[in-house]
Amino acid sequence: MVNLEWYRIFLYTARCRNLTKASQELHITQPSVSYAIKQMEERLGLKLFHRLSKGVELTEEGRALFNYVEQSFSLLDTAQKHLQNLKQLNEGEIRIGASDSLIKHLLLPQLNAFHKEYPGIRIRLSHGKSPEIAQRLKEGVIDCAVVHMPMSDPQLSVQPLATLGDCFVVGEAYRELAKRSLTMEELSGLPLILLSPGSSTREFVEQWFAAKGFAVKPDIELGNVDLLAEFARLGYGAAFVSRTFVQEEVERGTLFELQLDDPLPPRSIGLATRQDRNLSVAADSFVAILLARQGQIGSSTPPVQPASHTPLS
Amino acid sequence: MVNLEWYRIFLYTARCRNLTKASQELHITQPSVSYAIKQMEERLGLKLFHRLSKGVELTEEGRALFNYVEQSFSLLDTAQKHLQNLKQLNEGEIRIGASDSLIKHLLLPQLNAFHKEYPGIRIRLSHGKSPEIAQRLKEGVIDCAVVHMPMSDPQLSVQPLATLGDCFVVGEAYRELAKRSLTMEELSGLPLILLSPGSSTREFVEQWFAAKGFAVKPDIELGNVDLLAEFARLGYGAAFVSRTFVQEEVERGTLFELQLDDPLPPRSIGLATRQDRNLSVAADSFVAILLARQGQIGSSTPPVQPASHTPLS
DNA sequence: AAAATGTTATAGAGAGGGTCTATGCCAAAT
DNA sequence: ATTTGGCATAGACCCTCTCTATAACATTTT
């Protein structure tokens, strides 16, 4: 078997056409180069260099070898450069999964910040319902996922990322209701505007009502959080939404949050990753940044610039 | 600096997805593989494999590296195969130079034999006058040359290859002259058919005549040995040719060799190579075969098959 | 539960081979 | 003749890879 280090020595020698010079570039001594090439020639059973009085020169066979070795090493060089780029987050990709409702208001600001910092990293977003997301995570199609907790799966590791407070909001038409606290009876008597079934948010509302002994009979079902707010504003009823999603409109007075005798418990948002596999450098740095900001996320307008330029390990 | 042997270990491990299995294919132990990969990961500052309960799996970064390394090693593999072919004379090329007159009758039979034995080796013939040939040899454009001796050049090494006997031949018209020995006067009185000036053969004739005190005044000058014989046969005079070139026709009785009081000295043919540079494997084996047959060459019909299948070293 | 299996990681000893220094040798240039 | 610039060789050294033995861990089997 040919020692691969010999190839490196061969390459430099062929380029320098001079053992002494090659040895200097390789930071070894001239006899080491001489020895390596001798070994190589013996192992291959071929003379690779003509020894001239003023250096060496590739033989026919040596030249043949040189062409291959040069290409081969050029590949290894670019490989190393590529890896350095991956390590320094100049390249790479992150595949993130998230429930539809979380992408826009919770994930997007973070993604913007990250992308501004590391524009070379491609971000692939994949939306869907929580169980689908979990499945993709387990299949390795995505690196991490932002999901509603609880999510218990032995293969997944979920860390808390933020808590989102939910609320019911109404428009101008129901303004008077927002001035006092409502009972469950009063609430369930209102026309409700909810997300379509199948989402974990809808699940949450239904379980909450059920826990209080009420059944949910929404008047309007929509697939999109923005539309929920829109219909509430137009006076169709009370929409169930995350408080931060409508914060601005509530402050502007175009929407009104209902106060409840039984307050809604806050819901936790978690960041899920696979238990067994480590993340790629890019994904890992994104996750680390996200977790470092845990708490600041989703509460108000998040800071756009990350704290530091140095990638987290 | 990354030890190149690590790449080999990395490659096998990536293919096997199992350190233990890779270690077996590499004929080393599992801890050695573990160690090498750990070294590599530390040096690169990147995890290359996920360690799973039942083997290992490339990380994102590892996969990036793998693609390069696989290509790179495939190149080195083909390089080795190529070199083996060169060594075993399945490939290669020989560039031979020869005086015009020597190619057909002296070199061609040898080339045919060699080519039948080693059909993969490309033979490049380059003809010209002796000084041109010598120049090409020194420039490294050709590997060896078949030339008339003497050829003294400090950069060239010339070894005797054969001796060619020359003679004058005539056709039917001068048949009677061939029955007795001729004096120089008689010879120089005949119409002479010689090669054009510039060739070493013509040089030789002129010097020989000059040594005897005669000047050469050829009636016909031609550039081609076959034509010399042709004109002699047609009765235009006495042609100066190598004896072996016309041997057949003399035996058939279509040409007649003149006997001379002063016999022509035999001329030596040599095989010239560069003093300082070694030959390629292919050229070396051809030269070795030629020199081994030294003496049999040009004397009569040479044997077509070489003695042995094993290449000479 | 416990044992067996299959996997990687770690520790420490050993040795092989590459590397070094010193020197020789050769050819070309001065 | 001497100097210069180059490669080859010899022998000592030491680094680093490899090995054996064992740990650690997860999964599967009993």
Image: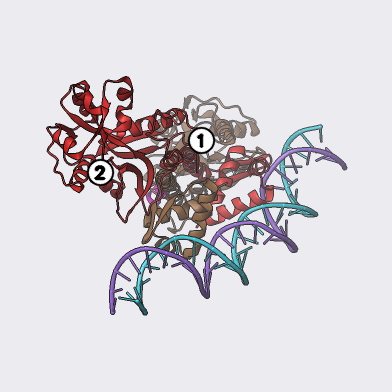
Chain colours: A red, B brown, C cyan, D purple
Residue B99 is tagged as: 1
Residue at horizontal 25 percent and vertical 44 percent from the top: A130
Q: Position of residue A224 (x, y in %)?
A: 21, 31
Q: Which class describes the residues within 10 Å of circle 2: few (<14), some (14-19), or many (20+)?
A: many
In the rendered image, the vertical position of residue A61 relative to residue B9, given as above or below = above
Chain of residue at mark 2:
A
Q: On the rendered structure, is D3 left or right of A144?
A: right
Q: Please provide percent x and percent y for residue A237.
A: 17, 28
The residue segment tinted magenta is B112-118
Residue A294 is inside the magenta segment: no
Where does the image place residue A108, in percent across and percent down from the top left? 35, 31
In the image, A68 versus A186, the foreground residue is A186
| Mark 1: secondary structure | loop
Kindly check if marks 2 and 1 are in contact, taking CB atoms under 8 A apart as contact.
Answer: no
Chain of the residue under the numbered disc 1 shown in the image: B
Q: Are marks 2 and 1 on the same chain?
A: no
Label placed on residue A200: none
Magenta stretch, main secondary structure class: helix
Q: Residue at x 53, y 56 (%)?
A: A43
**Mark 1 belongs to which amino acid?**
Ser
Q: Disc 2 marks which residue?
A: A130
Q: Which residue occupies the foreground of this view, B195 or B295?
A: B295
The answer to whether one can see residue A120 in this image is no
Q: How far, Cα to Cα, is label 2 from label 1?
A: 87 Å
**Viewer-nearest of discs 2 and 1:** 2
In the rendered view, does A154 fall on the left or right side of B20?
Answer: left
Is residue A216 at least partly visible in the picture?
yes
- Amino acid identity at mark 2: Ser
